[in-house]
Amino acid sequence: MKIDRLDVRLLRLPLAQFFETSFGRSYDRVFLLIRLEGEGHVGWGEAVAEAHPYYSSETTKTAWHIITEFLAQRVLGKAFEHPREIFPALARVRGHNMAKAGVEMAAWDLYARILGKPLSAVLGGTRDRIASGVSIGIQDSLDQLVAKVDKELAAGYKRIKIKIKPGWDVNAVEAVRAKFPDILLMVDANAAYSAEDGPHLARLDGYNLMMIEQPLEYDDVMDHVQLQKQIATPICLDESIHTVRIARDAIEAKACKIINIKPGRVGGHGESIRLHDLCQAHGIPVWHGGMLESGIGRAHNIHLASLPNFTLPGDIAASKRYYVPDLIEPGIEVSADGTIPVPTGPGIGVTIIEDRVQAATLRHVSLDASAVKSH
Ligand code: OSB
Ligand code: MG
């Protein structure tokens, strides 16, 4: 597969509903789309860096800089036998996994389209539908939270995740559990707690939560080991799992019992498959996280979540929860049983509506092998 052209676009889309985490409230989403051309086909990827460096140290601006000045030259004009060669080809650039993933995932889409196969088949997926859950942000009141949970359950979602932070944790879980004693429920702290909060977080143990996601610092492993000894609720790591190597250490040290895989966080599909396989070999279940992706990133996520060790419902929900309209047609829809079918067409298997992409574009650059400088 030879890659002839790489386009990067910065887009902004308004969110259908605001999204609040322990690091703040968002009303819109900026992100990058990467389009690769080669062998007469086109592949699309999404770089999930945000406008701010609060979830991750990357931003849309750092990802733009890294892709245009350091990654493009390492793929343009080059021939790859298989997209799993892309991440190693970018290894000289340290970190910047979201920038790398945007390019790498576009290459997987391109490769699958050249073969005329759905991406899931190329990734090693084994299921034709994935289990879907929702991530509900911090609300203005507990009544609003309970009403949101009610609405999402009515839409078919089988697993509810609520965001927590100090002051919005035990009370929020208590309010949801009082109304819905039996649902699959979990919480995500986005690193809002510290090592001394063990006794406080142990108060969540009485609510039969599936897991608590990322209670402590984004770069921590060992404080989570100590915390897991103080609480019965299983710890799931998100932010801390930057690489497959850190995942290996976290599993070995017993810092977590579950891992959330986001391809953007670990550098793309190739690294996600390695992480998935590592977890499977150690009996650690995984689920697919979300980064408020447009339909393009979301379609990639659905294909990846078709791999066998994605045994827990993930944060991959219907388009209409995020963007109306989405950048793809038809939008991602969830069935009454809370599942999403894996698209069966070539590549990510969805139709990108280029007029909508263009209308949401704030900045665009198109590069070929002659246009890139080498660093
Ligand atoms: O921590 O999982 C997270 C969104 C942006 C950044 C971090 C996270 C999230 C979500 C949203 O929880 C998941 C979704 O896409 O619905
Ligand atoms: Mg999370």
Image: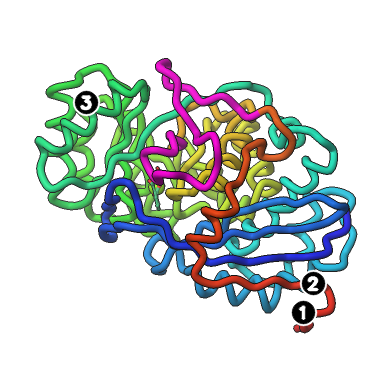
Examine the rendered structure and indicate whether residue 209 appears above or below residue 182.
below
- Magenta-drawn segment: 316-343
Task: From the viewer's side, name the closer residue of 203 and 37.
Answer: 37
Label placed on residue 150: 3
What residue is pinned by disc 2?
A: 368
Q: Tell which circle, 3 or 1, labels the residue nearer the N-terminal end.
A: 3
Q: Can the viewer see residue 265?
A: no
Task: From the viewer's side, name the closer residue of 135 and 184.
Answer: 135
Give percent across and percent down for residue 81: 89, 50
Task: From the viewer's side, name the closer residue of 193 and 363.
Answer: 363
| Residue kind at label 3, given as amino acid type | Asp
Alpha carbon distance from label 1 to label 2: 7 Å
What residue is pinned by disc 1?
A: 372
Q: Quadrant location of residue 87? A: bottom right
- Tally of numbered tags: 3
Does the CB distance between marks 2 and 3 fall below 8 Å? no
Does the CB distance between marks 1 and 2 fall below 8 Å? yes
Alpha carbon distance from label 2 to label 3: 50 Å
Report the magenta stretch's main SS: loop
Residue furthest to the front in view is 355
Task: From the viewer's side, name the closer residue of 328 and 214.
Answer: 328
| Residue kind at label 2, given as amino acid type | Asp
Is 310 included in the stretch rendered in magenta?
no
